[in-house]
Amino acid sequence: MNTSTFPKTLPSAEDIALARESGRVLSTVLQTRAETHQIDFHDEQGTVRTVSIPTSALRLLLDVLTEIGRGNAVSIIPIHAELTTQEAADVLNVSRPFLVQLLEQGEIPFHKVGTHRRVRYQDLIDYKNRIDAKRRKALEELAAQAQELGMGY
């Protein structure tokens, strides 16, 4: 099974409109307290197939539709997934060489499969959360200094 799917293009205007409408309908369905839902799929020959879907999966689908409805491309990555260095760099929105540097400096744990580095998705998110917290703290300190110095913002 492919552990990650990185979209190559942004959604089309038609996809955006369809995602918005589908998301509105799905959100009303999710207002019930049911643990599973049944959905009927109709193929081009008119055959109907009923599928039971867990509510948690439908909530994830609603999140995906919401993002597509905003014009965003969406990636789904299992939390336990192991990513290539390029996939991990894409998640962090950094270059692959920069990510490799972080790995070699011990900032993010990794292991090798043969000669290839692999990064656990959860380790990547833990790193991102640590960096984001440091950035927020630095920004708060700068804002406090600006207030103390009466810099007008």
Image (cartoon, rainbow, N blue to C red):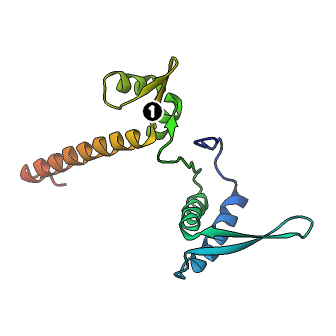
For mark 1, what is the residue? 119
In the rendered view, tell whether residue 30 sits above or below residue 123.
below
Residue at the extreme top: 115
Quadrant of res 101: top left
Residue at the extreme bottom: 32
Q: In this image, 39 relative to 102: left or right?
A: right
In the rendered structure, which amino acid carries the disc numbered 1?
Answer: Val
Q: In this image, 42 relative to 103: left or right?
A: right
Q: Nearer the viewer, residue 129 or 41?
A: 41
Quadrant of res 120: top left
Give the crowd class for mark 1: few <14, some 14-19, many >=20 residues within 10 Å.
Answer: many
Task: Identify the residue shown where x is 85% and y is 65%.
Answer: 43
In the rendered view, tell whether residue 28 sits above or below residue 77.
below
Q: In this image, 11 relative to 57: left or right?
A: right
In the rendered view, tell whether residue 90 sits above or below residue 137.
above
The image position of residue 104, as x and y in percent, is 35, 21
Q: Nearer the viewer, residue 41 or 133?
A: 41
In the rendered view, tell whether residue 118 sits above or below residue 62.
above
Quadrant the N terminus occupies:
top right
The image position of residue 152, as x and y in percent, is 16, 54
